[in-house]
Every structure is written in C-alpha cells, then in structure tokens.
Image (cartoon, rainbow, N blue to C red):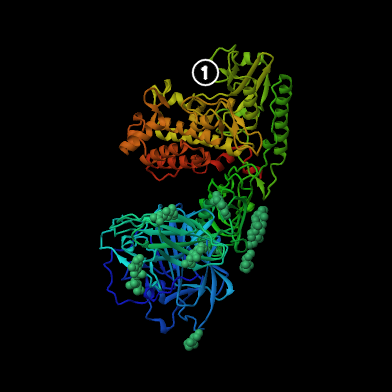
Amino acid sequence: MAFLVLLAALLVLAAPPVHVVGQRKGFVSIDCGLDASSGSYTDTQTGIEYEPDDPYIDAGAGENHRLSADYDVYLRRYQTLRSFPSGVRNCYALPTVAGTKYLLRAEFEYGNYDGKNSSSLEFDLHLGANRWRTAKLPEFKDEHEVVFVAWAGWAPFCLVNTGRGTPFVSVVELRPLDAVLYPQAVRPGLFSTTYKRLNMGTSSFIRYPEDPYDRFWYPVENANPRWVNLSAPAGSIQVDITSPVPSVVLQTAVAAAGNDTALTAVTWRDDSEYSFTTLEHYADFQNTQLRQFDSYSGTVYESYKPPYLTRGTLYTVSFKAADGSYNITLVATNTSVLPPMINALEIYLLVPYENPTTLPSDFDAIMAIKKEYGVTKNWMGDPCFPTNYTWDGVKCGNTNGNTTRITSLNLSSSYLHGAVSKNFALLTALQNLDLSYNNLSGSIPDSIPSLTSLRVLNVSGNQLSDDSLCKNYNGSLIVRHDSSKSTCNKKITASRKSTVILVTSVVVAVLVVSAIVLAYFICRAKRNSAVSVVDHTRNAQLEIAPRSRTNQGDHLQDNENRRFTYKDLEKFTDNFKQFIGQGGFGVVYFGHLEDGTEVAVKMRSESSSHGLDEFLAEVQSLTKVHHRNIVSLVGYCWEKDHLALVYEYMSQGNLYDHLRGKIAAAEALNWETRVRIVLEAAQGLDYLHKGCSPPIIHRDVKSSNILLGQNLQAKVADLGLSKTYISDGHTHISATAAGTAGYMDPEYYFTGRLTESSDVYSFGVVLLEAATGEPPLVPGQGHIVQRVKQRVSTTGDIGSVADPRLGAAYDVNSMWKVVDTAMACTAESGAGRPTMGEVAAQLKDSLALEYARDNDDDRSVPASIAASDSAALMMSGFGPSAR
Ligand SMILES: *[C@@H]1O[C@H](CO)[C@@H](O)[C@H](O)[C@H]1NC(C)=O
Ligand SMILES: *[C@@H]1O[C@H](CO)[C@@H](O)[C@H](O)[C@H]1NC(C)=O
Ligand SMILES: *[C@@H]1O[C@H](CO)[C@@H](O)[C@H](O)[C@H]1NC(C)=O
Ligand SMILES: *[C@@H]1O[C@H](CO)[C@@H](O)[C@H](O)[C@H]1NC(C)=O
Ligand SMILES: *[C@@H]1O[C@H](CO)[C@@H](O)[C@H](O)[C@H]1NC(C)=O
Ligand SMILES: *[C@@H]1O[C@H](CO)[C@@H](O)[C@H](O)[C@H]1NC(C)=O
Ligand SMILES: *[C@@H]1O[C@H](CO)[C@@H](O)[C@H](O)[C@H]1NC(C)=O
Ligand SMILES: *[C@@H]1O[C@H](CO)[C@@H](O)[C@H](O)[C@H]1NC(C)=O
Ligand SMILES: *[C@@H]1O[C@H](CO)[C@@H](O)[C@H](O)[C@H]1NC(C)=O
Ligand SMILES: *[C@@H]1O[C@H](CO)[C@@H](O)[C@H](O)[C@H]1NC(C)=O
C-alpha cells in the first residue's frame, strides 16, 4: 500500500532551510539517475548529501531519466530517476555492516518521465533474495521502507519486473538504526515494512535532523473532529537524542474531545495473509488529574497510564484481524478523569521470506570477487535465490535451514585479469572453480588448492607462473592447466592407497606392517614406471618424491626402508655405545650403516609408555611420508623383544638445543637462520596436513622435535604420536592424550578433538620460542602467548619481544611478521587459525624481508626460498628429466 501522499514532503517548501548540522554517519543517500559527472550535492532542508547512483549499480544497468517539465517544482532528488527497461531483476548493492539494524527507504516519482503518461505501473521490490513490497504507481509518488538487520557486507536492493511496466526508482536511502529500536519488528524470516508512521496533533512533517534516524513522521491526513490537539511547551519532554521517538514528535498529541471516553487513533484495511506489528508512543504533559485507559490493538493493555514528560511505548508484536479490518482504540477506565490521548504511532507489515539466502560469508566473498575483477554478468542481488534469478556461472547447494552455499563458480572466459584472488578461497564450500581462458597471471594462492571441498580447479588458458602449477595439492584435487607450458613433472603418488587398519594383535600387526611396506614398494614401483605420464588432470601430489639428493645422506636414497635384525642394530651402534637422546618412544643411539651412512637408532625402551600402537603409527606414517622437511626412515627392527626405528642422522641436534640448550650458550642462531628453520618445519607440517591423504596430525609439535641436519636444514621428527584420520568423512580425531605441556592446543582440553589446527597452535608456540628465545612456560610468569601479547600491547615495540641475543640484527618487519603469524596460530578457536600452508607463506615473506636487510646488494631471495616447491622438484630424483 502506498504511503500517504504528501505534497508537503515532495514540493520545494517556502520554509527557510533548517540550520544544517551535516549528514549523520552511516547514511547512504542516493539520488538515482543523477548524472555521475554532476557529483554529490547537499539538500538545503535536511543537510543530507545526495550522491549519484553509479557506484551502487552495475555499469549498463538501467537508464537515466528526468521528469517531464511539468514536474520541475519538485525537490531536486525527485527530478531524476533510473529506469530498468531491460533485465528482469536489477539491483543496487548497498554497503552494510553485518548485524547492524537499518531502515531502507525507496521513493518513486513517475512524473511522466517516459512521456507515456502511464496510469498504472507495478513492480516488485526485493531485499536480497526476498520480496518485501510491490510498488504501485503512479499516484503522486510511492514510497516504501523496510527495517532489517544486515546479514552481510552488502544489502542488495532489487527492482523486479513482473510484467506490469518498467521498474524505476528516484531515491534510495539507507539509515543505520540504534540496536534498541524495533526489537519486535525485526524477527528472522520476516521483513518489517513500514505501513504507517504518524505524528499526532500536528500538521508538521518530521524527518532528519529532528529525527536522528531520518524516519518520516507524517501528520494525520484527515484529523478526526472529535479529537483535540494537545501540545507541550517546547523542551518540556525529556528524551535522549537517540530516543526511539524524537522529542519534537512526542511534543504533540491528540486526546478524545468533550465527554468521549474512547479514542480510535487509526483504522485501516488489509486483506493479505500477513500480520502487523504496532507501536503506540505516549508522553503525558497534563499531569493535573488521573489519565488511565485500556489500549486495544490486537493486544489489550489494561489500565495504562502514559508517563509524565517522558516516553512510554506499547507494542503489539503480532496483530491480525480476521476480517481484515484493523483499528487502534483507547478506552478510558471508569476511574480516569482525563480522556485518553496518544502522541505518535507506527504500524509495520510483517512479510515472510519466500526464499533462503546465500550464506553471508559466501555472499561477501563473491561480492569481493565481483568488485575485484569488475565482473559484469547478471551478478546482482542474492547469488542463489530466487532460483530463477541465480547468477551466471554460480551454482549453489548444501542448503541448511535458511542459508545455502556457493558450490561451483565458473568464470571461464570472463575477461579476468591480474592476480588470482585470495577471495576465491573464502568460498569454503566450493567444489568446482573454473577460471579458464582469462588473462590471470602470477601464481595460485596456496589457500585455493587448500580448500577442503575443492575437487576441480581449471586454470587453463591463463598466464600463470609455472611454479604455481607445480605445487603439492590436496590429494583428490584435480588441477587442469596448460601442461605444455608447465615444466613440472606429473606423477600420481601411491601413498593414498596404503590406508591401514591397525590391529593390536602382534601377529596380525606383523602381517599388516609387512603389507604396508610391501604395498609401498609395489606402489612405488608402479609410480616409477608411470613417471613419464603427462596428464592434464593430474593428482598433484608432486612433493611425494624420494628423499632429496641434497640431503646430508644422499646415498640413503638407494636404501629402501629395510627391516633390520637386532644383531644389525648392535653392529650399527657399536653395541649402543653413543647415546644421543631420549624421545617419547625411547632412547636414541648414534650409528653407521655398513656403507658408513650415519643413522639414529631409536629403541623402544621397556619403560616406554608408548606401546606397539605408537610404533606402528610411526612406521605407518613414515613409510608413507617422504618430504625434504620430514625426517626419513631408513628402516626398522621388529623382533620379539625389540622394536626399533632407524632414521637418517641429523647431525646438528634440534631447534630447542640451538635456542636454549647447550649449543645456544655457545652461539645464538641468527634471525635469518631461525626464520628459515621454522619455514622449513612449516613446510613439513603443511605436507603432513595437506600433502598426505588421509591427512596426518603430528600431535607433538615442539622445538625439540624440529631436527637440524648439516647446514641446519630442518626436518620434523617424532611422528610417534601422530595419527591419521580414520576416513575422509572424519574431520577430526578424538584422542586421549597428546602433546607436551606448553605446546598443547587449549581448545583440545575442552573438546578432546584434535585437528590440524592443534598442530598449528603448537607451531605458533615454536614461532614465539624462535622469536623470543624463551621457553613456552616460565613458572610464575605464565604462558609465552600471554607474555608476548602483554609486552606487545604495553610497549607496542617488537624490540620488547625479540630475543635479546639477536641484538638489533633483524629486520623489524620480518620479526613482526613472525610474531603476528604466531599470534594467529595461537588464536583461541581452532577455526580462527591459519593453515600450515598460510603460515609457510607468511614465513616466506618474513624470510624475504630479513634476507633483503641482510643482503643490501640486489641479489634476490635465494631460489630455494622464492620457489622452494619447484626447487625441491628439481632436486628430487624425478626432476624435469622424467617428463
Ligand atoms: C495524462 O493523463 C491524464 C489522465 O490520466 C490526463 O488528464 C492528462 O491530460 C494526460 N497528459 C498528457 C500530457 O497526455
Ligand atoms: C528461518 O526462517 C524461518 C521462517 O521462514 C524462521 O522461523 C527461522 O527462525 C529462521 N531461522 C533462522 C536461523 O534465521
Ligand atoms: C488538529 O491539528 C490538525 C493538524 O494541524 C488540524 O487539521 C485539526 O483541525 C486540528 N484539530 C483541532 C480540533 O483543532
Ligand atoms: C459532558 O457531561 C456533562 C455531565 O455529564 C454535561 O453536563 C455536559 O454537557 C457534557 N458535555 C458535552 C460536550 O457533551
Ligand atoms: C475496532 O476493532 C474492534 C475489534 O475488531 C471492533 O470491535 C471495533 O468495532 C472497531 N472499532 C472501530 C471504531 O472501528
Ligand atoms: C469500574 O469498572 C469495573 C469493571 O471494569 C467495575 O468492577 C467497577 O465497579 C467500576 N467502578 C465504577 C465506579 O463504576
Ligand atoms: C521466477 O519465478 C517466479 C515464481 O516462481 C515467477 O513468478 C517469475 O515470473 C519467474 N521469473 C522468471 C524471470 O522466470
Ligand atoms: C564453464 O563455462 C564454459 C562456457 O562458458 C563451459 O565450457 C565450461 O564447461 C564450464 N565449466 C564447468 C566446470 O562447468
Ligand atoms: C593479458 O595481459 C597482458 C599483460 O597485462 C597484456 O599484455 C595482454 O594484452 C592481455 N591479453 C588480453 C587478451 O587481455
Ligand atoms: C575446466 O576443466 C574442467 C575439468 O576438467 C571441465 O569440466 C571444464 O569444462 C573445463 N572448462 C573449460 C572452459 O574447458
């Protein structure tokens, strides 16, 4: 239903301009159809600045028009409009803050802009996926408002052609409201559209600046002769500036005249199936005698006494008249001396949603992509609903309650250029992403292939850098690209096939382990024979290559995992002569293989709390895992009383020793080396999480489990506690015990669930150790995360955090990056933490910064860092020559 037609609101009034206080923060005021080149202007009556609509609507949507000359006495904002002769749905994207309450108002002044002198025009108004009103024209002007809580970073306001004329709009205004306003009018699943807002006992129309929220308060059109007008002395009514009703509105009222004991404030008819919400606003200023009445408006409020010189409001949450005939009537009680009165009232129609909406985070992400690339398709309104207006190239699914997800995005041949946006990775339910035949350059951000549900990524026909196409991707991801341009080798790894069921029975276990090892060899053999297969749709687990040739133990490569006897071990270790450490699983001895290769032999001690399960876990993990930053298994021993694992020997100890142990006392690691070590460790962990299928959670990440080889190359060790997911369907493992005090994910305490993010937390602690040189726990001083936070927030100085042994020999930004990354890793909620891939990317940046500081000549970052993934491939046994 149209608002009251009010010429006073429409015409240029003779009234002098109010003293303008300027526009309120958060107002969006759009004069549709205004020529973009003419810019914004300030309305002299309200001080509101109106701007052209171009920034809020896609280029090419609609046409600008001007009213016919007969209407040039109208206010400037009504003089122009935008009409939409083509396209069924056209939308404005209005910027909002999710969770904030808003009033959206659209005004329509036809003014014979098209010279057709139309006598009837109708079109629908949508907010997001749902219709809230039908605009009907032309009378003089139509005007509609909706009160809503923003659900995302954008609120799409759409005009939908329903075949009854060309939609158009003259003015669009968005006003943030205080959260306390309209608590009952904003219910999920319902639009509260303004039906009437009346200021009683006056002839004045009120809006901004008298109403700080810029609501329109209309005078009553045909005042009832049985009413008397009441008016309070100016300033006598005490309400706050942000009051739900401005004092100027409360200052006037109507009361029943003569001896009448009842006052019918408003009547209306509505035959729709919808119900209404009403608000009656009162403020008495005639406190001479008792005024008391019953209010009837769907709800009956008995014996109400309006408050004196301040506001009182009666709400009816849902008002539905069976016969479609509504009224609000006040009846004096028999003890009341004064007649009933009322100052103002508001009536809202509650329109239910017809459709679910796209999940807000998906909506925000795709809007960001749209803005970033300037996508011009029919990308307006809600991406998924209504279903007959869905966006080209967007497919939706996974509807859950009132929200749905974007599951497929096809931007093939869409003239995209520039870098591949990280915003694609915000569409976390994406299964298909087709970016083919665009002009994208640079590399694919790690976060995209890391999307857990992503199955197909098509980047063919772009100018992407080769190294980005050669990364190790999530096991089941198919990446389509131009193989002819790519220098990476393509192999299908075998590791995913060796899923193993652990059985505690020793006899069965022996068979199982043999089977794993056997399967591994068989698959490896297969892989080797398939090495030259170049396929488009590769399963890109490229880093599952044998141990790197650059390793300290080059020749280890020739030794497949071997089964040794206890006698062999005695021989290698010279009867366990050189004890080098104690792990969770048992003691570790130094040894030499027959060919002189140095190894570490880890014996399961009798007292070890770790049993056969852990042993099996480690064998299982290590036979599957081959990465330059994961310690390699050379072989194992399994005899009746002896379980042992034989690793490559890491001659330089571990990170803990270098930060705080004996070695540290002798020589502190410089910052560049520390960052390089943690970067390498991060790459190892990223590989466990994303390069292995099923993923492996280390569960005991700490500085003493980051081992260092010659040249201080870092490798993650001690996978004895690590676990794999039981199946792809599982998203976490329930574990009974894991980790080391100080490194343990606090979320794990509460949930008992371990995910990759638990490793990320522990790794964050390692990062802080590397930055500060301090242990995680200092008795009496709390945990390292708290200590660092405290220091950063009180001093704001990274120098207060950095290890004093570094002196000033570090790049400040590089240090900040590591500390910031550590803080992100140690976020309380696992969901808020980055992935190891993201962590590694940050550390790469940090290393580049430090490297630049340390190398003032213009050598760039060493290739092994800048393109570490492809570099590793080159060095692996299956380098480019294999293609
Ligand atoms: C427009 O239509 C109205 C009646 O609907 C008529 O009175 C008026 O003269 C028309 N104006 C023009 C310019 O055709
Ligand atoms: C979903 O919509 C229905 C009405 O359509 C509403 O009752 C319900 O509260 C809504 N749920 C959420 C989570 O918004
Ligand atoms: C009350 O005020 C309205 C609006 O100014 C006016 O139309 C009406 O005649 C007034 N009523 C009385 C009884 O004066
Ligand atoms: C109001 O009632 C009183 C007595 O009940 C009567 O004298 C008076 O005339 C009435 N006034 C009107 C305007 O009806
Ligand atoms: C107001 O509504 C009530 C209930 O529907 C009805 O009984 C009454 O007659 C109505 N009053 C007026 C003045 O319309
Ligand atoms: C006032 O009305 C109530 C019922 O609404 C009745 O019980 C009471 O007797 C009445 N009082 C007078 C003085 O009429
Ligand atoms: C979309 O569907 C609605 C109802 O399902 C229908 O009224 C409308 O005409 C359809 N629009 C288009 C463009 O098909
Ligand atoms: C994307 O759209 C193009 C045509 O524009 C089509 O050839 C291609 O198959 C689509 N991709 C997917 C994954 O559906
Ligand atoms: C692709 O981008 C490059 C570099 O920005 C540019 O030279 C080339 O003309 C673009 N090609 C197309 C088809 O837009
Ligand atoms: C991109 O690759 C996917 C998977 O192979 C395929 O379905 C899609 O059609 C490809 N897109 C184009 C435009 O060829």
The location of residue 394, given as percent across then percent down, is: 60, 58
Residue, disc 1: 581
Task: Name the residue located 60 percent from the left edge and 17 percent from the top edge.
Answer: 603
Assign the C terminus to one quadrant of the image.
Answer: top right
Can you say whether 587 is above or below 718 in the image? Answer: above
The location of residue 738, given as percent across then percent down, is: 55, 26
Task: Name the residue located 28 percent from the left edge and 71 percent from the top edge.
Answer: 17
Q: In this rendered view, identify the residue nearer to me: 130 or 752.
A: 130
Residue 149 shows in the view: no
Q: In this rendered view, identify the residue nearer to me: 465 or 253.
A: 253
Q: In this rendered view, identify the residue nearer to me: 745 or 477.
A: 745
Q: Residues within 10 Å of mark 1 (few under 14, many from 20)?
A: few
Residue 692 shows in the view: yes
* Label 1 element class: strand
Left or right of residue 571, residue 829 in this image: left
The location of residue 450, given as percent across then percent down, is: 57, 44
Q: In this rendered view, identify the residue nearer to me: 500 or 745.
A: 745
The location of residue 773, given as percent across then percent down, is: 39, 28
Can you say whether 577 is above or below 722 in the image? Answer: above
Left or right of residue 202, residue 730 in this image: right
